[in-house]
Amino acid sequence: MALNKHMRGQGVVISVPMIWMILLFLLPFLIVLKLSFSEARLAIPPYAPFLEWVRGLPRPVLHWNNYAFLFTDPLYVASYLYSLKVAAVSTLCCLLLGFPMALTIARARQPWRNVLLMLVVLPFWTSFLLRVYAWIGLLKHNGVINNLLLWLGVIHQPITMLQTDFAVYVGIVYSYLPYMILPLYANLEKHDPLLLEAAADLGARPFKAFLRVTLPQSIPGIIAGSLLVFIPAVGEYVVPSLLGRSDQLMIGRVLSDEFFENRDWPVASAVAILMLVLLVAPIMLFNHFSGREIEAHK
Amino acid sequence: MKRSGAFPWVMMVLGLLFLYAPIISMMVFSLNNSRLVTVWDAAHSPTLKWYGELLQNDEILDAAWLSIRIAIIASTGAVILGTLTGVALARFGPFRGRTLMVGMTTAPLVMPEVITGLALLLLFITLQQAIGWPHGAGFITITLAHITFCTTYVAVVVQSRLAGFDESLEEAAMDLGARPPTVFLRVTLPLVVPALVSGWLLSFTLSWDDLVITQFVAGPGSSTLPMVIFSKVRLGVSPDVNALATLMVLLVATGIVVSAIWMNWQNRRRERDAQLAAAANL
């Protein structure tokens, strides 16, 4: 097997995507890191050079001001905390709704299993932006839900749902639900039904069998699904922009505003780096679990 | 399986209702005559007038054409790079840099889009200053960005497809004297064709759909379809967007059903071939 020619062919196969990803994934982060230590300037590009030449030698100039600024202005700290809260609540809701759904799919007979799986995945293939937009029509003051509840006589005044935390949770759970269900399904599908039968034979009621047999086995799936929802949700931009509050921004929106509205590139970079620092542990955990758990992706 | 109780099924039905209610309401209101999107104008509805307006809206049509071109190039590029990555990860065993490669294919799956978008834009600006390329933001920068994030999805799909087959097929071909490039073209590639098809389609939808990363790298001149939609709906609901959404949902649903049938047919054919081969060996 280990022929020289063979190895050279492997080298090409490995290095082409490797070089691409280093250039377009890794290198950009180093540039963001570098820029987060630069000083903003009213120029094009709007930041000071990173290297200073001292006696013919380059020396990096590290400005910690951008980071200091993020901690002194309560707006940023509040946005980070709010984003973490929204992501955590949404992930929990996704899990509570997604787990029973994944379980149903995994225990359904064919061809039902494939049909249900397709029904869950189908919205995932249609425009995310348009699906979030659809909620505006449902949640509005004179939207479908309010009109329905008024007509049924459940409420007498329309409820304000749009531009609230509730709307953001709904939007995020809605758009990320398949990301929770797929890894959970991939895990649950592999469980041996004989274990449940054994538990039943030994006198365990279905709920107890679920708690003692199914749940412990599905922990890797729960972790993979939760991370797949939680990590991108922290930086979510579209959902809070369309459905969320205007008095409390999520950090993704803050980053984008810093960059496009204030044109403060160094502060925007520092916002991004700090977000990465918060997410680095979950991302590493995800890398660890994903190898096994997104196998049955799609 | 029995005895799973009614509760999971209740949640399943509620979950599907939750997933489909917004889409169905959007489709229904795309037929509404009133400009007030959520008030049903029973006297003049259903009507196809928003579909007519959509076809005369040059801004939307131009943006859709730009998005289609980008999506085709980006998904083709992503399939090439993603296949190489997937094959390397699934077949080459431990090699130097494997950990880095795994990291670079899984991290982008969860990376918040604002961070990726900012990072890519800063890369393009840095490159422009250093080597004068790419000249300005637009078609090229969007396409490069889309190839990058689609590649990881293709890699995951290809890798998991290959993980489903063991290496004995390739080893058998080698034992029979096939050289590595032949083995790849004649054995490995045909195995992953379904993954390439679904990887391409997945990349196409991701590219077609992406707003956040695109907004960062697009520059002032070029607007893709999601950018046009976003700027429209930020100002409030608009009925022609409902019509557009309905068309897109119907198109995607048709595509999914057709590809599911095709995959099913492929699997059946493979099973039949396997049975024939087994019968021939008897």
Image: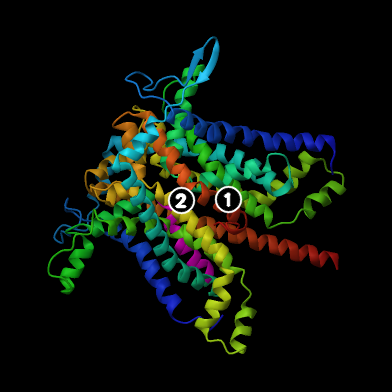
Q: Residue at x 38, y 32 (%)?
A: A66
For label 1, the residue is A287
- Residue A231, numbered circle: 2
Q: What is the x, y in percent for residue A230?
A: 44, 54
Q: Which residues are magenta?
A: A113-127
Q: Residue at x 23, y 47 (%)?
A: A247
In the image, taking residue B153 as reference, residue B159 lies left or right, namely right
Q: What is the x, y in percent for residue A146?
A: 19, 64
Helix or strand or loop: what does disc 2 sit on? helix
Q: What is the x, y in percent for residue A83?
A: 36, 50
Q: What is the x, y in percent for residue A65?
A: 38, 30
Q: In this view of the protein, can residue A268 be seen by the observer?
A: no
Tell me which secondary structure the magenta stretch mostly adopts.
helix
Q: Are marks 1 and 2 on the same chain?
A: yes
Res B117 → quadrant: top left
Q: Is residue A126 magenta?
A: yes
Q: Which residue type carries mark 2?
A: Ile
Quadrant showing the C terminus of chain A = bottom right
Q: Earlier in the sequence, mark 1 or mark 2?
A: 2
In the image, taking residue A294 as reference, residue B139 lies left or right, namely left
Name the outermost residue toward the top: A55
Viewer-nearest residue: A67 or A216: A67
Helix or strand or loop: what does disc 1 sit on? helix
